[in-house]
Amino acid sequence: DQQVKQNSPSLSVQEGRISILNCDYTNSMFDYFLWYKKYPAEGPTFLISISSIKDKNEDGRFTVFLNKSAKHLSLHIVPSQPGDSAVYFCAASASHSGYALNFGKGTSLLVTP
Amino acid sequence: NAGVTQTPKFRVLKTGQSMTLLCAQDMNHEYMYWYRQDPGMGLRLIHYSVGEGTTAKGEVPDGYNVSRLKKQNFLLGLESAAPSQTSVYFCASSYSRASGSTDTQYFGPGTRLTVL
């Protein structure tokens, strides 16, 4: 039972434009959300996170938005660069359930010149 | 500061063989984790450890065993490998919640295992 869902397997965006990656979750107990970036043959790299007490967190070109009522979060990349081409995983955790991160299946982002 | 390292990077086993994957971290993290990633899937937690000498089961623990004899190392064992265990295995580590830290986990580069 997938508790974190990334419904778009892939996304293609032109360089310089905005990339928006979406993530939905079903467990209302999740209180911490993360985005990881993964290149082929490498491990996931932490990108940005947000606590459930916030609705927005920004770090340079990356912004994560959280809509708790809709159980939805999104990652905005502005402006997109070719080096951003990778698979992006959304993950979530709940304080009461210990230590596991629940991952979505990932969205493959391609930024074209 | 190497972060999280994994040994080996690649391995091919025959059904029924055994092997151990080694994970090491130099960040003094309390928590360590083993995940597997299959094509078209997110990462799924196999086992985790909240401190030296402790281990616990994750979402998909069957067919695997783990040990955490030293704080910096976390071993994943396959006693009798099966083709269903063909996957990419990732190790991760993080600080403890007790330290007031968040759930950010840092991952190793992965081990690609094929079981024939």
Image (cartoon, grey):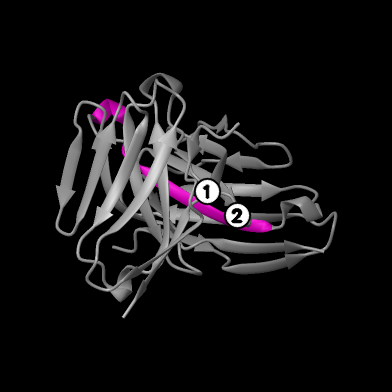
How many dots with numbers? 2
Place of residue A13 in the rendered image (x, y in percent of width and height, measured from the top left): 34, 67
Place of residue A75 in the rendered image (x, y in percent of width and height, measured from the top left): 29, 49
On residue B107, which mark appears?
A: none
Circle 1: residue type: Lys
- Identify the magenta region: B87-99
On residue B40, which mark appears?
A: 2
Q: Is residue B57 above or below residue A109?
A: above
Q: Quadrant of residue B98?
A: top left
What is the secondary structure assignment of the residue under circle 2? loop
The quarter of the rendered structure image containing the C terminus of chain A is bottom left
Residue B72 makes an appearance in the image: no
Circle 2: residue type: Gly
Residue found farthest to the bottom: A113
Q: Is most of the magenta stretch helix, strand or loop? A: strand
Residue at label 1? A105
Residue at image location 16% in from the left, 48% down from the top = A58
Describe residue B60's horizontal placement relative to residue A68 as left or right. Answer: right
Q: Is residue A25 above or below residue A59?
A: above
